[in-house]
């Protein structure tokens, strides 16, 4: 019976380790080992020593808890903390997702300059993928850099057009809608209208826009 939890632990450890560093770190998979380690250490210490160890833990753990609560209180803090785990080894599986997620969160709080840096890093690590280019396009829209936005959304559409699954279709629709907005500001109403019609057809987005 004692062997079963360890087998489950090893299965989870190997699965998560192959996934990405952040998941492994935040899964606290070392906890089962700590449960076994505490009694072994306690057997070798006197009662007086154990009291001092316990007191030290009581002082240290609240500070560690505050740090963890602070990190988990905000999505940007969370992904910035995750980024620290991979900066020294960018070849770790899934590292590009950390930079992508941080870029998305920065976009949500209207910090496009920082978002562009993180999204470009995610492309550098993970290769071209439509989601990153669509979000780069949004960042350039926030900065009123219409031509850069056109380029990004066009890349997203071209990449996503090679697939036929729901995610690919969704990315084509997002790219078309974003590009339509950029075309509209630039006064290129024919191209804008065509993209609005495409996003409307695929995901019913932009159907209400009437161009004159």
Image (spheres, helix red, strand yellow):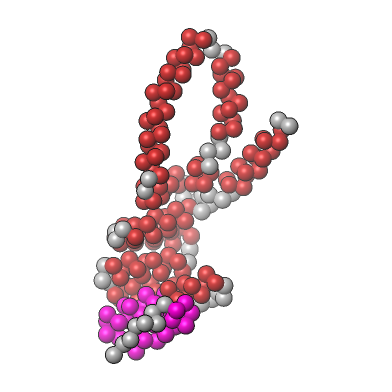
Give the residue furthest to the front. Answer: 208
Residue 101 percent across, percent down from the top left: 42, 56
Residue 184 percent across, percent down from the top left: 30, 82
Report the residue at 44% width, 14% height from top: 52
- Magenta span includes 176: yes
Closest to the observer, 47 or 152: 47
- Residue 138: quadrant of the picture: bottom left
Report the residue at 41% width, 34% height from top: 65
First to last magenta residue range: 175-204
- Magenta: main secondary structure: helix
- Residue 67: quadrant of the picture: top left
Rendered position, 179 above or below 71: below
Report the residue at 59% width, 14% height from top: 43
Rendered position, 155 above or below 208: above
Report the residue at 40% width, 82% height from top: 207
- Magenta span includes 72: no
Q: Quadrant of the C terminus?
A: bottom left
Rendered position, 207 above or below 31: below
Is residue 95 at all visible to an observer of this figure?
yes
């Amino acid at each position: 019976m004692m062997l079963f939890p360890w087998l489950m632990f090893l299965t989870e450890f190997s699965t998560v380790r192959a996934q990405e560093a952040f998941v492994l770190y935040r899964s606290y998979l070392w906890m089962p080992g700590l449960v076994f380690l505490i009694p072994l250490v306690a057997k070798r210490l006197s009662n007086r020593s154990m009291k001092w160890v316990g007191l030290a833990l009581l002082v240290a753990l609240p500070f560690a808890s505050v740090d963890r609560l602070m990190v988990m209180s905000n999505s940007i803090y969370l992904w910035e903390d995750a980024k620290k785990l991979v900066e020294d080894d960018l070849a770790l599986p899934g590292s590009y997702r950390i930079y992508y997620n941080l870029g998305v969160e920065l976009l949500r709080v209207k910090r496009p300059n920082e978002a562009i840096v993180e999204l470009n890093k995610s492309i550098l690590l993970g290769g071209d993928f439509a989601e990153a280019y669509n979000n780069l396009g949004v960042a350039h829209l926030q900065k009123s850099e219409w031509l850069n936005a056109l380029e990004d959304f066009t890349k997203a559409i071209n990449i996503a057009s090679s697939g036929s699954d729901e995610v690919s279709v969704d990315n084509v629709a997002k790219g078309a809608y974003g590009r339509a907005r950029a075309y509209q500001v630039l006064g290129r109403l024919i191209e804008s209208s065509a993209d609005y019609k495409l996003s409307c057809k695929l995901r019913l987005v932009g159907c209400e826009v009437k161009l004159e």
